[in-house]
Image (spheres, rainbow, N blue to C red):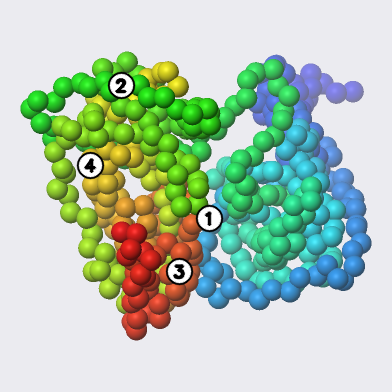
Amino acid sequence: MVDSETIATVNTKCFFCGGSRHLRAKCPAKDCMCHSCGKNGHFSKVCRSRNTPITKTKVKTSPSHKIKRQSCKYCSCIKDSTHLTSLIATSSVPGLTKSTVHISVNGVNLKALIDTGSGESYISSNIPREYDWSVTRSKHKISMASSQLSSVTRGHTFASLKYKGEVYNQFKLSLLDELCTDVVLGLDFLALHKELIIPFNGGRPAFHVCSLNAVKVEAPQLFANLSPDCRPIATKSRRYSFQDTQFIKAEVEKLIRNGIIEPSKSPWRAQVLVTTNERHKKRMVVDYSQTINRFTYLDAYPMPRVDEMVEKISRYEIFSTLDLESAYHQIPIQQSEKKYTAFEACGKLYQFCRIPFGVTNGVACFQKTIDTIIEKEKLSDTFAYVDNVTICGTDVDSHNKNLLHFQKVALEYGITFNESKSVFATKKITNGNILAYLATEPRQSITKIPCKIFKI
């Protein structure tokens, strides 16, 4: 027989969270998922199933699916810490079926979780070992969604991925123990595509994520010096072809979605133009020549001398060139100056929240902002010319140190890069070259590019 004192002692603990006894509705574990068994409603520390062995399914593949690849001596240690939002567990996590797809990796059918919060892609470490795939030794620290949780990769492999007929050859997958699924496809995979669409079939309208955030800096003065006779001008509306009208409509929707423009009540009104480059790609630009540019004095902030910059860069051994995506559109402008950027499109009036292309002092303001960040954060061996940033090093170690420092600062400020136009850890700047120059064989040769000079 148990006395009342003993009963009181037994009942002071909550079965679901392990804390002091309370109402179930107020339990902190009520809506949480257990990391041990994958079920909802309790914490793993009180899980009664945590000692239950987990069975693993084995899949066979032929040796012909093996891929051999040597490790890159320049890129093996560029990143010492990446991020992963997926929970670490040994069983499939319920509720993630909408973002889980079936893919083929080296001919093996596996489940892959689409994870927009993961910087890289991962594969459960037991899979490459089971099928004897070539694995390159490497070790990187992975930070989870909670900063108190972390893990370490067990190397990486280059595999052939296939999904719905699309093939991704030599794709890097880092090995990680106890993934919640076979494969996690992160931003390095997702960035290969124009957009990601996952139908959840919810009742509310589609939720669009802003892909180009404003850099976390004080908004510069874009129109600091205006002439005394400055007055609002509303230019005459223009007619466009059906194709151009549809293109303008799509561009405006994209700019609104990314928070770059907003509806306006300004007395100013510029008109948009549709231009085509040499690759026949259309681009929407705003013609400010008849509005605010008429009254704007030139900002005398000096631009870097290209020849001097190239001469400095050529003294280094290893380079990384990063291209800022829609560079001007990452820098915010002051609330009081937005009215000057107003333009007409599709029968409505809009104004910019970020620096627009085409204003007189857009280049100077942008260059000044980037230079300020580099100086304030003491970024070594880093050179910026408008939207092109070059990080250098006299050797691999110094280059990686400088690049990591820059990446950390860029993450803190919210700077977005175009990875498809960026090149990392190279001895020759072939992409993202500095205007009409090409740096090759450091300390030996600086070559001018005739075609670039002609275009300038």
Q: Which label lies toward us, 4 or 2?
A: 2
Q: Contact, CB < 8 Å: mark 1 with mark 3?
A: no
The answer to whether 10 is drawn above or below residue 23 in the figure is: below
Relative image position of residue 33 (x, y in whole percent)? 73, 33
42 and 235: which is toward the camera:
235
Residue flagged by tag 3: what amino acid is it?
Thr
Q: What residue is rendered at 82% in x and 21% in y? A: 3
Whole-Å distance between the Cαs marked 1 and 2? 39 Å
Residue flagged by tag 2: what amino acid is it?
Lys
Residue 369 seen in this snapshot: no
Q: Which mark is residue 216?
A: none
| First along the sequence among labels 1 and 4 | 4
Whole-Å distance between the Cαs marked 4 and 3? 29 Å
Q: What residue is rendered at 85% in x and 53% in y? A: 109
Residue of label 3: 430
Residue flagged by tag 4: what amino acid is it?
Asn
Question: Would you call the spot at circle 2 few (<14 residues within 10 Å), some (14-19), or many (20 or more)?
Answer: few
Residue of label 4: 361
| First along the sequence among labels 4 and 2 | 2
Residue of label 2: 236
Q: Secondary structure at mark 4?
A: loop
